Image (cartoon, helix red, strand yellow):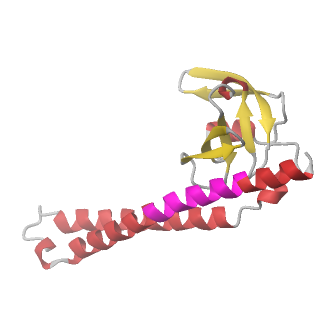
Amino acid sequence: MDKTNIDKTIIYKNNIVAQVTAQLQEELSLALVAADNAHKAATDDQSVAETQYDTLAIEQSYLAEGQSRRVDEIRYAIKCLATLPLEASLTSEKVVMGSLVQMEQDLAKQQWFFIAPAAGGYRCQVTTGQTLANITVITPQSPMGAALLNKVVDDDVIVAVGTKKICDYIVAIK
């Protein structure tokens, strides 16, 4: 990969990280409000149990705990993306953390997978020249992420999804 393509790929990857981080920041703001509201509801005087069967306070505390965990997960994902070494993926011919990977079946749709340590399932779009690329973030813990790691161009990839098997091969790694 020549210097110009390396620079463009870094810009694309930085753009992906910035877009996904912005989505996570929005979600974090909402989750913080939800966690605060759930905590207030759990400790409100109206939530005090009036009988042994009144479980409103317990339910509210479970909700508050879940919302707090979600806040922690989002903060963790933001931190992971911020510290993702994108340059390291450019020197590897294998699929590694930070790689952009395209499968043969996704060529026409300009669909790419971005391997990241967190934020799996988030999507964004990046303009590559005159083409709009659709990016889906996947983690190594996902079936597709696990199947792609350490593969090279032209390697077959087989992923079991429920009772189906998806068979494809890698056409590009950036």
Name above or below for residue 139 compared with residue 81: above
Mostly what secondary structure, the magenta segment? Answer: helix
Q: Nearer the viewer, residue 13 or 98?
A: 13
Q: Residue furthest left?
A: 50
At x 21%, y 71%, the residue is 41
**Residue 84 on image: x %, y %:** 72, 61
Image quarter of the C terminus: top right
At x 24%, y 75%, the residue is 40
Q: Nearer the viewer, residue 128 or 137?
A: 128
> Any magenta on residue 146?
no
Q: On the image, which quarter does residue 133 sit in? A: top right
Q: On the image, which quarter does residue 39 sit in? A: bottom left
> Any magenta on residue 21?
yes
At x 64%, y 53%, the residue is 16
- Please state the extent of the stretch shown in magenta in the rendering: 12-26
Q: Is 63 on the left-hand or right-hand side of 85?
A: left
Image quarter of the N terminus: top right
Name above or below for residue 165 compared with residue 130: above
Q: Residue furthest right?
A: 2
Q: Nearer the viewer, residue 96 or 141?
A: 96
Q: Residue furthest front?
A: 130
How many numbered marks, from 0 up?
Answer: 0
**Residue 52 on image: x %, y %:** 11, 66
Q: Is 127 on the left-hand or right-hand side of 94?
A: left
Q: On the image, which quarter does residue 85 sit in? A: bottom right
**Residue 109 on image: x %, y %:** 62, 28
